[in-house]
Image (spheres, grey):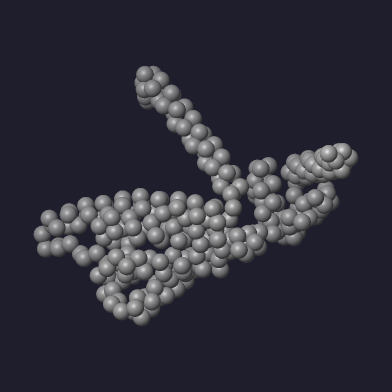
Amino acid sequence: GRSPHTRARAGPTTRAMSDLGKTLAAKKESFDAWLKAQSDPVEVGITAAGGALQGSVLGYGLGMMNKSLEAQAATMPNKPPMAAQGSFSGPPKVLALNLAVFSAVQGGLTLAIKKYRGGVEDIQGSMMAMFGAGSALSLVGAATGSSTGAMGGEAPKDAAGVATDAVRTGALFALLNGAFMKVGQMFSGKDAAQDHYYAHANNMLATLGLEKYEKNFRKGLLTDDTLLLLNDSALQEVRIPPGPRLKILNYVDATRASMARQHAEALSLANSTQDAPIK
């Protein structure tokens, strides 16, 4: 076992790490709330810039790792280093640029498509964003004079070849992304195309710690537009136990009361504005 001195040192360190985690989480929550309050173009632009920053840091780190592995391979007998192939290989600065562009386009397009489609977030939207990101990855390689194509092999030399490689790379990334998401849906049992119908319901259940009953809401088709109509018999019908039913109904009652209060305040403000003398 650890000595008392070790435990004493570990206690403050653990608390400090926990406090730091809470502080960072609070700052992230505050930033996310601020970001959502911005106009759509600003939100998309900031999201893309954040993706570019993350991608550049990740790309530079991967490039340094590749450089180290190549140096080690060069010292091994009868095992010469392999030539870098594709946009996810190469020196640190090249990888940083490639992943910055890829992450920026993917993050920005994902959000832009979601907003354009009214909040719908599904496989089709994700595939469209990944097509754009894959195409951008190919184009940035061509623009920087890379000797290899985005997915390996010799880089195209003429404009038609560059365009073809961009479309091919984008299509490959989109298909792979769609396949992975489809497999994920099969294992999770969720249909992402239907999630936007249950966004508020899922948020309510998560707030109450009742996420396990999301499937009950789906089976009973208790979509967001039915939340304020919920009653005990409807929740019994979808086989939700008494305890969780009470929590859900209490939440719904509080929401109704809050909406009624806001409505009354709005009416009062409107009446006071009408009654005010005109100067």
The residue depicted at 65 percent of the width and 46 percent of the height is 206
Farthest residue in the right direction? 275
Residue 30, image x, y percentages? 56, 40
Farthest residue in the left direction? 77
Farthest residue in the bottom direction? 160
The residue depicted at 69 percent of the width and 51 percent of the height is 200
- Judging depth in this view, the residue of 23 and 270 nearest the camera is 270
Q: Quadrant of residue 33?
A: top right
Q: Quadrant of residue 257?
A: top right
Q: Quadrant of residue 105?
A: bottom left
- Left or right of residue 11: residue 204: right
- Judging depth in this view, the residue of 26 and 175 nearest the camera is 26
- Judging depth in this view, the residue of 126 and 48 nearest the camera is 48
From the image, which quarter does the N terminus lie in? top left
Residue 248, image x, y percentages? 75, 44
Residue 108, image x, y percentages? 50, 58
**How many numbered circles does the render carry?**
0
- Left or right of residue 52: residue 127: right
Is 46 above or below relative to 137?
Answer: above
